[in-house]
Image (spheres, helix red, strand yellow):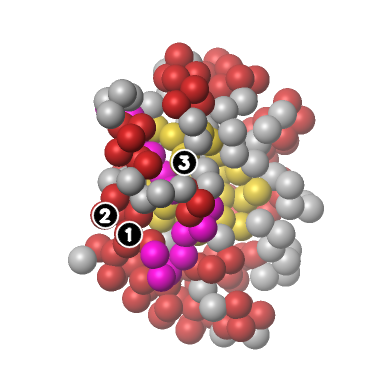
Amino acid sequence: MKSIIQNYPICAILRGTDPKTVIPYAKAVFDGGVRMFEVAMNTEGAAGQIEALREAFGDAAMVGAGTVINEERCLLAEEAGAQFFLTPSATEYVLRYCRERSIPLLPGVMTPTDVALCLSYGYDTMKLFPAGDLPMGYIKSLKGPFSGTEYVAVGGVGPANIQQFFDAGFIGVGIGSSLAPKNLVQEGRWDEVTQYVATLVKEIKK
């Protein structure tokens, strides 16, 4: 999973997205330079959105399933063609499921106990959640005893603070509805969404 994040350090989180706008929104974000998408499995019609995104982008983008917390969602996500899974917590069933099937997984952690559990299943790249509610130096505290681990910040990440997370040592971030101004999305001003995202990506690359 580490190599995937290094190639795609920004993940656009799609949760509760209107099925009518998910593709034009994703294409606008893609054109802005974000090539990784997570469809939250607690979104109505999530499996269909994953299938549509996979068809729209092919191998040009990574499309995964988020909020994969139980057997039903694992099966639905895999059947839909999700290229990776994300969880909000260190759920042993999902850890085993993905390890047995060689599915790239970004498991959610918050505590040292969570990290240790994920490492026991062979996962050294994890999602720190909710990152925005924790001190920015918390990642260093985890990396101390758990050397070699890497983290992706999810929860509370937005354009105003995204650079702070990279500066703190995160190798990637996940951003939801704050990735682009809501009025641009609601009004379908996709060219402006692309410009906004492109500016954000450019600033981070600096």
Q: CA distance from mark 1 to mark 3?
A: 15 Å
Callout 1 crowding tier (Cα within 10 Å): few <14, some 14–19, many ≥20:
few
- Nearer to the camera, 48 or 1: 1
Which residue lies under the disc numbered 3?
Answer: 128
Kind of residue sitting beneath label 2? Asp
Which residue is at the far left?
206
Q: How many marks?
A: 3
Mark 3, secondary structure of its residue: strand
Q: Position of residue 142 (x, y in %)?
A: 36, 32
The magenta stretch is 148-161
Q: Is residue 76 located in the magenta-colored stretch of the structure?
A: no
Q: Tell me which label, 1 or 3, sits earlier in the chain.
A: 3
Q: Tell me which label, 2 or 3, sits earlier in the chain.
A: 3
Residue 187 against residue 138 in the figure, above or below: below
Which residue lies under the disc numbered 2?
Answer: 167
Q: Which mark is residue 164?
A: 1
Labels 1 & 3 near each other (Cβ < 8 A): no
Kind of residue sitting beneath label 3? Leu
- Nearer to the camera, 179 or 104: 179
| Quadrant location, the C terminus | bottom left
